[in-house]
Image (cartoon, grey):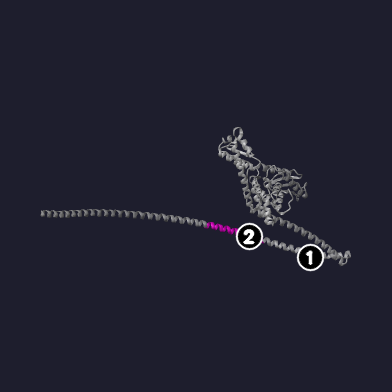
Amino acid sequence: MMNALIWLIVGMVIGAAVGAAVALWRKQVADQRTLDSATARAERLLREAQEQARALEQEARAEAQRLRQETEAALARRRREVEEELSRRRREVQQDEQRLRQRWEDLERRLDRLNQRELALNKRQSALDKRANELERLMEAQKAKLYEIANLSPEEARQQVLAQAEEEARRDIARIIRQIEIEAKEEGERRARKILAIAMQRVASDQVAELATAVVPLPAEEMKGRIIGRNGRNIRAFEQAAGVDLIVDDTPEAVTISSFDPVRREIARRALTKLVMDGRIHPAQIEKVVSKEREEVERIVLEAGEEAAFEAGVTGLPQEVLKMLGRLKFRTSFGQNQLHHAVETAKLAAMLAAELGADVQIAKTAALLHDIGKAMDHNIEGPHALIGADFLKNYGLPERVVHAVAAHHHDVEQETVEDIIVEVADAISGARPGARRESVEEYIKRVKVLEEIAKSFEGVKECYALQAGREVRVIVRPTEVDDAAAQRLARQIAKKIEEQLQYPGQIKVTVIRETRAVDYAR
């Protein structure tokens, strides 16, 4: 039993040894295969790397060749550009040299002319000196002859000479005084033009072109029937509530609101727009919306007046005055918005007053409110300047402001420099380019009427309206109109234009009288 166990153990050991040997052999075989595979793979990777290296080398050579060609082309192009730039610079230098040469020649010619003129002046001065000496000699001879003929004593002759000298001095003084007056007038006009130019240049305003009618767009054509309503009840209710005329015509997808009062027109436009957007259009809703928009427009009017006063730098105005001022937001004159015009006039007046040393606050306050009479109901009769002045007086504004408002169109006599400043600022604001406009038909009609007015006077040969109707040049027959009559004719034409035409700014009337004398040498 014991032997069998030993043999079993021995067999197991031998079996284990044989299994280990077999496993070792198999492992060596597997390792050899793995080594062979790795070697083959390494050789394959080496070959691929060498092929890639050769390909990259070829690509690098090709890229280097391409870069070399591009560089050579860029250098050639740059060389051409530099050569062209040098050629252009040479041409410019040659042109500059030619201009300098021409200028030098001009300067030399001018210097020659100046030298010749200096020589001529020297000759003239010598002649004048010679003539003065001759006159002095003749005066001495005249005095001696006077003593001899008149048998006067030297004292009496001296008295007569002094009297004659005094008379000549008086004439010289009168001539000098006239010259000083002319120079003072020219200087005053020059300074006035300078001040006006400074003020106008400092004001930068937009051009305005507003319409007098309001058009409300509609989303669809069938909305017109809803606006009119059954038997026209909606349109009647709207016109009665808003105080406007509602025009429903063939204009596609739009209706027109017409009213003499721009504030009512704006209320009606806003109300109709709200009704169209809401879709509920019936008399009760119309009255409700119109009432609500009337309150909204009143608020907008007050805000517009406050903004205008703030922009113009005028403070302390009563609320009712601000409301009335804000109503100008919806009024125009020749297309110019009156609230913008008022603010612009206030700025101009402030600048003019500062330049002239006048009261800036009075000037700009009066200028801001000068057209407030245009915002009042048309049932109030009278010129807008006087209506506005009465309105401002009722609310306790300073007397100088009230008077400047009343006098800006000469409805009352101007008394202070602020009155004149307000008038000038108003004229500048209305006459600047782009401030006002008129239709082509009205413009052509005004130009024709200008020429007809000028031609209606006796002695007028031709007449032309120039500068968009702001100047009329009248050519008269010199045999029928003398110089004095030409002055009267200019005033008469200007007066007739003022009486018969309405126009923005001013119109210059120039009367030209020319006499020519022609003869022939045979």
Residue 96, given in percent of the width and then of the height, sits at 58, 58
Q: Quadrant of residue 283?
A: top right
Residue 123, given in percent of the width and then of the height, sits at 73, 63
Q: Is residue 245 above or below residue 505?
A: above
* Residue type pointed to by label 2: Glu
Residue indicated by mark 1? 133
Q: Which mark is residue 105?
A: 2
The stretch of residues the image draws in magenta is 86-111
Extreme residue toward the bottom, this view:
154
Question: Residue 506 versus residue 487: which sits nearer the camera?
Answer: 506
Residue 130 seen anywhere in this rendered image of the structure: yes
Mark count: 2
Residue 512, given in percent of the width and then of the height, sits at 73, 49
Residue 200, given in percent of the width and then of the height, sits at 65, 53
**In this picture, residue 266 sits left or right of residue 174:** left
Circle 1 sits in a helix, a strand or a loop, which is it?
helix
Q: Is residue 125 above or below residue 224?
A: below
Residue 212 seen anywhere in this rendered image of the structure: no
Q: Are marks 2 and 1 in contact (CB under 8 Å)?
A: no
Residue at left offset 88%, top offset 67%: 153
